[in-house]
Amino acid sequence: MRLRYFYRLAAGCFLATIALLAALELIASIIGQENVAWLENPPFLVRLPLGILGVACAVGIISLWFGMMWDCLFVNKLSTLSKVGWFLLLLLTNMLGALIYYYAQFQKREPGISQ
């Protein structure tokens, strides 16, 4: 049960990171690259917490990726062809595939029950 919460947190953190990076790119394109030069070298007190958060999110999404591969191969009771397809998606698309599998297969199941 705790693992499900960890996976939910990792998926949310990854989506928040993608949204933040997209927002920063949008802001940079609107106000111009020369006006956001401070983003290239922010102060240490800004970099430290963001760096710690980035490391935590990276560990979380890599754990999510391995967890979803494990779930696909050994826990989920899909047909063999479906398992091969999902596993190839997970293997070839890495973290994005882990998010797709998480929301399409893992999250829809009842906790502790495999289909």
Image: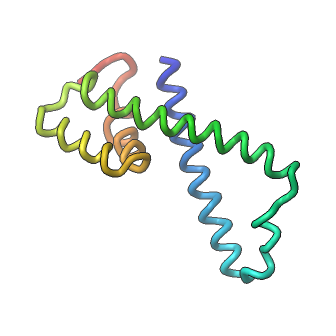
Tell me the colour scheme of the image. rainbow
Classify 94 as above or below 76. below
Residue plotted at (31% across, 50% down): 92
Q: In this view, does 69 lie above or below 34?
A: above
Q: Which of 102 and 96 is in front in this view?
A: 96
Percent position (x, y) of residue 55? Answer: 64, 40
Left or right of residue 42, residue 90 in this image: left
* Numbered marks: total: 0
Q: Where is residue 72 in the image (x, y as percent from the top left)?
A: 28, 31
Quarter of the rendering containing residue 113 = top left
- Residue 84 in the image: x percent, y percent? 17, 39
Q: What residue lies at 48% left-to-right and 17% top-to-bottom?
A: 1
Of 106 and 51, which appears nearest the observer? 51
Can you say whether 81 is above or below 34 in the image?
A: above
Q: Which image quarter is the C terminus in?
A: top left
Residue 68, picture quadrant:
top left
Residue 13, image x, y percentages: 59, 43
Instruction: Identify which residue is drawn at 64% across, 70% down.
Output: 25
Indicate left or right for 107 with 34 as reference: left
The residue that appears at 79% across and 51% down in the rendered structure is 47
Whether residue 79 sits left or right of residue 44 in the image: it is left
